[in-house]
Amino acid sequence: MLKGRSLLEPKDFTIEELEDIFQLADKIIDAPENYEEACRGKLLATLFYEPSTRTRFSFEAAMCRLGGKVIGFSEPNSSSVAKGESIADTVRTVACYADIVVMRHPKEGAPRVAAKSTDIPVINAGDGGHQHPTQTLTDLLTIRRERGGFDDITVGVCGDLKFGRTVHSLIKALSRYKNVKFILISPDELKIPDYVRKEILQKNNIEYKEVEKMEEVLPELDVLYMTRVQKERFFNEEDYIRLKDKYILEEEKMKLAKKDMMVLHPLPRVNEISVEVDKDPRALYFKQAKYGMYVRMALIMSLLGCEKVS
């Protein structure tokens, strides 16, 4: 049972528990009308210390579609954080009003501090360049529904692999499935952190290779996971300007890929995927965003112990 649990990183849940969430998401997708009152009377608090569009709206839409309600803030200056209140005190206070908390924070580990400070479920909606587990649930549900499963696939992750928390979470999650191979596409400056390479890939004997050119590996990929170079993570704007256009997926490059390769992106997109690619049936990033709402509906229901209401 997931009732009362928190989700701070992908490995907080077993593969079997993840499958339960995905199966519930499938049921919601097939008959959303059956779940319109599933969380009636429940309150979700969104504590977003960093800007967000998709993740925050997705959680809010998920709770509203389940019949629940939402409170919270979308930037810390509108809360008592601006007065110097600690994360622990903020969450303890919010827990007096809400049944579940979703937190995004620029500091790694902040959601873990929050979870230790309260008895209600806390969901990590992104902590610095560390983890983004609900984006990973979104990514996994997309692959599962569009491809049928996770075993025996080659996944290319491209762009900012150093600061890209979505990449770190995805590699961590997919490393538990059978015969998954990773191709890591990035410049030297944006390679995956050592802890991901050593503690996840090498420790688990997962096949991977690191390359700099996207074109040379596109024919090998079953999934291409594009990411933007994140301006907000750079200390030096010159480095950002130099690297931001390093990888751009264009229509011509798509001709090199398999006919059934999936193109995913956690969004927002800047210019790393040309808009001309949007019409390609392999471009699934906007469909992926919709799956994100459904999987968050399933997650909220599971953590709150809500039952379907017909």
Image (tube, grey):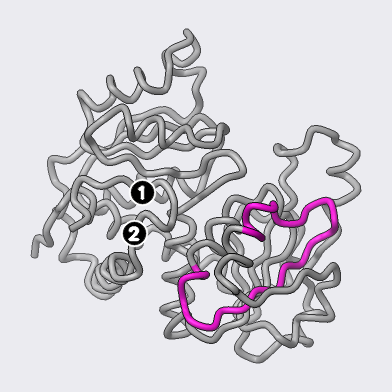
Query: Which residue has dot 2 on it?
Result: 13
Q: Who's the residue at 59% across and 69% down the image?
A: 264
**In what quadrant of the picture does the C terminus appear?**
bottom left
Q: In the image, is 146 to the left or to the right of 96?
A: right
CB atoms of marks 2 and 1 within 8 Å: yes
Q: In the drawing, what numbered circle is on residue 7? A: 1
The local crowd at label 2, few if under 14, some if 14 to 19, many if 20 or more residues have their Cα within 10 Å, is some
Give whichever of discs 2 and 1 has the lower sequence position. 1
Q: Who's the residue at 83% across and 51% down the image?
A: 189
Along the viewing direction, whichever of 209 and 67 lies nearer the viewer: 209
- Decide if residue 252 is in sight here: no
The local crowd at label 1, few if under 14, some if 14 to 19, many if 20 or more residues have their Cα within 10 Å, is many
Q: Which residues are magenta?
A: 174-198
**Is 261 placed above or below 131 here?**
below
Q: In the image, is 239 to the left or to the right of 94?
A: right
Can you give x and y, in whole percent of width and height, for residue 128 in the image? 58, 39
